[in-house]
């Protein structure tokens, strides 16, 4: 025991949980302390508001109807953002699956499309915003399209790679057994690609949030990104900080749910890992 | 063990010390002010490059660093957080950001007021009342929003009659080109860009509420009190720079170029700006009773939009001191219009 090498020593479950929580606790106290320090000098400091103030601000946004519109702003923002994100990711995932599979499986489709997709995936969407505005307007469509344009090319390229990585022997075997092209794609490739799609979606969620927040900052009347950029105008960190924490939590939950979904739907995918 | 623990904790400690507010030091000699691109503030950039600010700082044995910040709101936030001793901003933002954030601020220099630089523009319509029921793209909670509210009042409407869509100023011109956008409220040089596009018609502008959108150099009141020479150096430099702008063609050319236009374009922006070239005009404007009235309008608008902070129960929550009297709570004065240093410039005492 005493001679166990460092690389073989593992923390117990309880210790691991404690060690995992420790940095968060430290962040919490460092924040508290910094906030107190600044408030000693200026009791109304806006940069690092006290937790009580954050509570008051969030109570107003989440639990009281807005005086001007009668809506619960926090939930309205969350609903709008999640709707845009899920539609955008849904479209991007569908495109990723169909095009990625087609390009990866059919050389005749890959030849014309592959270079195009690569080129498009390298264009930074934020740099061509004026063109996107003209094409898709300023309403919901443009916000969803920004996510699609930002994420779909990455998914397509990734799934195309994953398709090509599948063992060649499987395709040969299926053909030997008499499968035609359609049957190979639908019965051999598609089932193996779908869990990889969910994996790719999980990895690109961060990118999707980035584009969503950007779209909402540019022109909007609700959404989590809208609120953050709006109240930034008067430095209301008591709203911005809990919104950021909320976005982080939402992103974490989405990621976790997708992982669980994938494990439940495709247990074999995780079997030999 | 102890030393490694110490080390582990020392790093966050040092980080904290850095981002906590600067400790109070009396009589300092190094100051930082920031500014952002706007017709009425271009003189700061020129004065920095031409060495005029340095010259005046030297006269008072000070060191004043002038920093240009590309993001206007960020510059005010940085000032409010304590990174700068002074910053250019409008009267409304001075009230809603530093003053509402508890940073006692003084409008050291009243530079100009917008006299047409901010405008409401409709597409294919000719009168302000046609705006009813339309979506209006603007930077929410900015002076544009204030201008729209004041404009709607003049035709017996209120914000309820339109739908405001928050739109980044950086994308205002591009979005105007889309068919979704039929009404915008924005400021120059965006106004002139948009008016050059087909169907655009200006239906209301800031010349119809003269003197209400004021561009200032705001400094930290405590810093100014402890270091009166800092104020003197800034004001002295400011009027020397404005003298250059009025008489020196090369100076104007440099400011025009820095703001991304040519002399003709800069002149047209100056035409819709009431710039106080001489301290007498600025002092007179600051002392007038209208300024107090204006700040009352601004405070009401800000309170209605929740900009005065959580603690505010009414629009008089924050006191605004003007030579004509205090608007609001005299026990909670956080914004002061003080013409005394501009008066010194007028009297030739700098």
Image: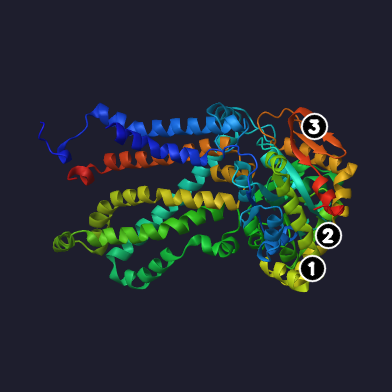
Tell me the SS state at disc 1: helix
Residue A159 lies in quadrant: bottom left
Would you say the residues marked 2 and 3 are in contact, meaning their CB atoms lie under 8 Å apart? no
Residue at point 67% right, 59% down? B54
Left or right: residue A16 versus residue B74 is left
Q: CA distance from mark 2 to mark 3?
A: 31 Å
- The residue under label 1 is B267
- The residue under label 3 is B328
Chain on which label 2 sits:
B
Left or right: residue A104 versus residue A179 is right
**Residue B179 image offset from top left, x and y in percent:** 66, 60
Q: Earlier in the sequence, mark 1 or mark 2?
A: 1
Residue B342 drawn above or below residue A161 = above
- The residue under label 2 is B277
Would you say the residues marked 1 and 3 are in contact, meaning their CB atoms lie under 8 Å apart? no
Left or right: residue A120 versus residue B232 is left
């Amino acid at each position: 025991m005493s001679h166990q090498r460092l690389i073989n020593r593992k923390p117990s479950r309880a210790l691991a949980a404690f060690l995992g929580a420790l940095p968060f606790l430290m962040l919490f106290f460092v924040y508290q302390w910094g906030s107190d320090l600044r408030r000693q000098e200026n009791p109304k400091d806006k940069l690092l508001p006290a937790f009580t103030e954050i509570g008051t601000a969030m109570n107003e946004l989440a639990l009281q109807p807005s005086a001007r519109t009668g809506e619960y702003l926090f939930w309205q923002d969350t609903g709008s953002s999640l709707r845009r994100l899920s539609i955008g990711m849904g479209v991007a995932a569908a495109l990723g699956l169909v095009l990625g599979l087609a390009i990866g499986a059919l050389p005749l489709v890959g030849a014309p499309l592959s270079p195009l997709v690569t080129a498009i995936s390298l264009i930074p969407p934020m740099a061509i915003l004026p063109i996107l505005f003209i094409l898709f307007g300023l309403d919901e469509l443009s916000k969803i399209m920004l996510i699609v344009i930002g994420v779909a090319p990455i998914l397509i390229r990734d799934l195309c790679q994953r398709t090509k990585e599948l063992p060649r022997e499987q395709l040969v075997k299926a053909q030997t057994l008499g499968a035609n092209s359609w049957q190979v794609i639908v019965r051999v490739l598609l089932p193996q690609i779908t869990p990889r799609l969910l994996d790719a979606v999980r990895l690109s969620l961060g990118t999707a949030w980035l584009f969503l927040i950007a779209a909402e900052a540019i022109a909007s009347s609700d959404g989590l990104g809208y609120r953050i950029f709006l109240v930034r105008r008067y430095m209301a960190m008591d709203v911005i900080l809990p919104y950021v924490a909320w976005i982080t939590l939402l992103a974490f939950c989405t990621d976790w749910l997708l992982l669980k979904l994938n494990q439940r739907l495709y247990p074999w995918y995780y079997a030999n890992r | 063990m102890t030393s490694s623990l110490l080390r582990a904790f020392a790093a966050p400690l040092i980080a904290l010390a850095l981002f906590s507010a600067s400790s109070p030091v009396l009589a300092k000699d190094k100051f930082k002010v920031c500014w952002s691109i706007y017709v009425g503030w271009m003189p700061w950039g020129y004065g920095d490059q031409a060495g005029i600010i340095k010259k005046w700082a030297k006269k008072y044995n000070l060191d004043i660093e002038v920093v240009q910040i590309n993001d206007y709101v960020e510059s005010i936030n940085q000032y409010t957080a304590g990174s700068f001793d002074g910053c250019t901003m409008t009267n409304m933002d001075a009230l809603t950001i530093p003053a509402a954030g508890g940073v006692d601020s003084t409008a050291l220099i009243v530079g100009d007021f917008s006299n047409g630089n901010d405008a409401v523009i409709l597409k294919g319509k000719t009168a302000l009342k046609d705006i009813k029921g339309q979506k209006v793209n603007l930077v929410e909670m900015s002076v544009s929003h204030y201008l729209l509210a004041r404009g709607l009042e003049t035709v017996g409407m209120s914000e309820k009659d339109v739908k405001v869509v928050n739109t980044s100023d950086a994308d205002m011109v591009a979005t105007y080109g889309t068919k979704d956008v039929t009404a915008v409220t924005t400021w120059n040089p965006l106004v002139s860009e948009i008016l050059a596009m087909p169907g655009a018609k200006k239906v209301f502008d800031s010349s119809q509420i003269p003197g209400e959108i004021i561009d200032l150099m705001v400094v930290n009141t405590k810093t100014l009190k402890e270091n009166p020479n800092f104020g003197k150096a800034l004001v002295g430099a400011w009027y020397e720079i404005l003298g250059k702008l009025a008489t020196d063609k090369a100076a104007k050319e440099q400011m025009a170029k820095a703001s991304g236009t040519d002399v003709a374009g800069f002149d047209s922006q100056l035409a819709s700006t009431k710039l106080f070239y001489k301290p007498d005009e600025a002092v007179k404007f600051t002392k007038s009773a209208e300024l107090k009235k204006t700040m009352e309008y601004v405070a009401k608008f800000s309170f209605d939009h929740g900009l005065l902070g959580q603690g505010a129960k009414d629009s008089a929550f924050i006191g605004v001191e003007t030579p004509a009297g205090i608007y609001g709570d005299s026990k909670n004065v956080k914004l002061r219009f003080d013409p005394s240093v501009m008066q010194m410039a007028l009297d030739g005492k700098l």
